[in-house]
């Protein structure tokens, strides 16, 4: 019995990839998640805020200066209330602050929020309590809470958000797993025979990319079918644009997965690498939790991930019903990463075959 345990232990210590997956990746993932989501769990959210001061009194100017000191570059001053509401609806601001006058002419503070941004609005509301008390000339917080005005589409925004976010995450996991089949073909010699029979490496990897893209598209379809009863009513163009987005997400995942596995010598080496990359992209890109809950540095860093572009594109199309430059940029980023990954995979496999 102990001899078997000892033999397995020696095999474990010789398997560096397995050791990394068992002992290195879990604490790294923990540190990543603690850094990314810790601020949101504590309620210390680095929200971006749009401000419009319609009252324009010395006291309200002092409130604006206090917010500027508190939020720094995350505070944007806009020219009118409609601009603040539009910024919150579009996601360019996590919440808004409107300072107006009530019927008696006294300054009044209102927080502007959109569906799904309740946490950011509540955090901003708490920050504004002492400032609103100062405006009212009271040392203590006002007896009534600062009002929150909801703008933009209303409904189950969480269903719309996570339909896109979850589908992206699992499309990438499935692509990473599926691409490792190429490593088995390479080790068995089947890939070399296919290259000779099919006229080169490019057709082989292109065929794998087509299949992985098809699988990813089917996964996205399954997720959106499950979410359909809770999604807003979609027009024909919204549905068509969402399908194109899903296809580009699947292509992106296929290209990136093929590039990662082409860089590995074996399945044992690829397993921890692809697992860690898939988790890292999902965490930073907003597939596990909305990015506005993250510290500002991680929110900015998230734009290097395909997930952030995909989730934002889905939100614009499905929730807000917008077709704008951001959607086109998302499509370009997803398609570009997918094609670049495929080209890189072909280049690495050709170099390996030439050795």
Image: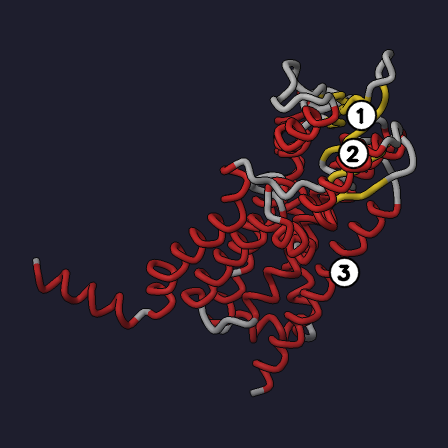
- The residues tagged by marks 3 and 1 sit, at their Cα atoms, a distance apart of 32 Å
Q: Residues within 10 Å of mark 2 (few under 14, many from 20)?
A: many
Question: What x and y, as percent, mark residue 205?
Answer: 65, 65
Pointer 3 residue: 336
Residue positioned 39% across, 56% down in the render: 27
Label placed on residue 88: 2
In front of the other: 277 or 229: 277
Marks 3 and 1, the one that precedes in the sequence: 1
Q: In terms of image quadrants, where is residue 109?
A: top right
Mark closer to the observer (3, 1): 1
Pointer 1 residue: 152
- The residues tagged by marks 2 and 3 sit, at their Cα atoms, a distance apart of 29 Å
Contact? badges 1 and 2 (CB < 8 Å): yes
From this view, report whether residue 335 is shown above or below residue 56: below
Quadrant of image for the N terminus? bottom left
Contact? badges 3 and 1 (CB < 8 Å): no
Contact? badges 2 and 3 (CB < 8 Å): no
Marks 1 and 2, the one that precedes in the sequence: 2
Question: What x and y, as percent, mark residue 33?
Answer: 48, 48
Residue positioned 82% across, 39% down in the render: 241
Question: What x and y, as percent, mark residue 283?
Answer: 56, 48
Q: In terms of image quadrants, where is residue 121?
A: top right
Can you see residue 117?
A: no
In front of the other: 275 or 83: 83
């Amino acid at each position: 019995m102990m001899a078997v345990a000892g033999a397995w232990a020696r095999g474990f210590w010789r398997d560096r990839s397995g050791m990394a997956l068992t002992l290195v990746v879990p604490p790294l993932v923990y540190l990543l998640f603690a850094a990314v989501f810790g601020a949101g769990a504590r309620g210390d959210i680095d929200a971006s805020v749009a401000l419009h001061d319609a009252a324009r009194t010395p006291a309200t100017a002092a409130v604006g200066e206090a917010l500027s000191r508190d939020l720094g570059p995350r505070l944007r001053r806009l020219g009118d209330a409609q601009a603040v509401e539009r910024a919150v609806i579009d996601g360019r601001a996590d919440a808004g602050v409107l300072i107006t006058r009530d019927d008696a002419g006294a300054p009044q503070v209102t927080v502007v929020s959109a569906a799904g941004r309740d946490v950011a609005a509540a955090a901003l509301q708490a920050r504004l309590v002492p400032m609103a008390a100062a405006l009212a000339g009271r040392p203590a917080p006002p007896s009534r809470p600062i009002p929150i005005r909801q703008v933009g589409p209303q409904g189950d925004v969480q269903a719309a958000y996570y339909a896109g976010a979850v589908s992206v995450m699992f499309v990438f996991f499935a692509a990473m797993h599926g691409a490792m089949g190429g490593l088995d073909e390479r080790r068995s010699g089947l890939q070399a025979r296919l290259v000779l029979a099919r006229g080169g490496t490019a057709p082989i990897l292109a065929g794998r990319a087509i299949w992985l893209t098809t699988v990813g598209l089917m996964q996205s379809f399954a997720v959106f079918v499950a979410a359909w009863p809770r999604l807003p009513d979609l027009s024909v163009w919204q549905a068509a644009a969402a399908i194109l987005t899903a296809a580009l997400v699947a292509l992106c995942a296929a290209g990136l997965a093929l590039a990662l596995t082409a860089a590995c010598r074996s399945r044992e080496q690829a397993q921890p690498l692809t697992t860690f990359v898939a988790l890292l992209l999902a965490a930073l890109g907003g597939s596990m939790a909305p990015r506005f809950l993250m510290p500002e540095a991680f929110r900015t860093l998230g734009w290097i991930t395909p997930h952030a572009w995909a989730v934002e594109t889905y939100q614009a199309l499905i929730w807000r019903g917008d077709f704008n430059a951001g959607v086109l940029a998302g499509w370009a980023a997803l398609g570009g990463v997918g094609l670049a990954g495929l080209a890189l995979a072909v280049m690495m496999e050709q170099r390996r075959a030439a050795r």
